[in-house]
Amino acid sequence: MGSKITVILKNGTELAYKDARVVEGHKTWIYQVNTNKHPEELLALIDPNHIQTLFTEEE
């Protein structure tokens, strides 16, 4: 069981990440996580001004 993160950008692009975690600040960081929910790999670094919708679903 992991989480699926979906990001819809203002230009209409939809990005989906499986087994990931979001960290938000000046930039939105999306990390791939291992089974212990620890960050392993940076998947995306997105400017929050470009994000229309961001949601997480548990699988």
Image: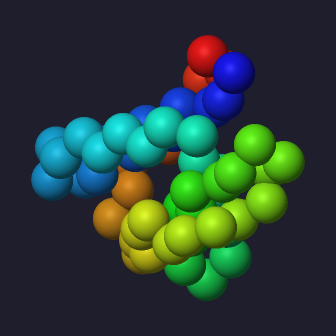
Residue 49 coordinates in the image, percent (x, y)? 41, 69
- Observer able to see residue 55: no
Instruction: Please report the residue visible at 43 percent of the width from the left and 43 percent of the height from the top.
Output: 17
Residue 43 coordinates in the image, percent (x, y)? 44, 65
Residue 7 coordinates in the image, percent (x, y)? 40, 44
Check the image and report above or below for 38 versus 56. below
In which quadrant of the rendered image does the N terminus lie? top right
In which quadrant of the rendered image does the C terminus lie? top right
- Observer able to see residue 40: yes
Residue 32 lies left or right of residue 47; in this view the side is right
Q: Quadrant of residue 32?
A: bottom right
Check the image and report above or below for 39 versus 9. below
Instruction: Please report the residue visible at 63 percent of the width from the left and 31 percent of the height from the top.
Output: 3
Residue 10 lies left or right of residue 45; in this view the side is left
Check the image and report above or below for 39 versus 22. below
Q: Looking at the image, which residue sits at the far right? A: 36
Instruction: Please report the residue visible at 16 percent of the width from the left and 43 percent of the height from the top.
Output: 12
Q: Quadrant of residue 45?
A: bottom left
Residue 54 lies left or right of residue 24; in this view the side is left
Q: Looking at the image, which residue sits at the far top? A: 59
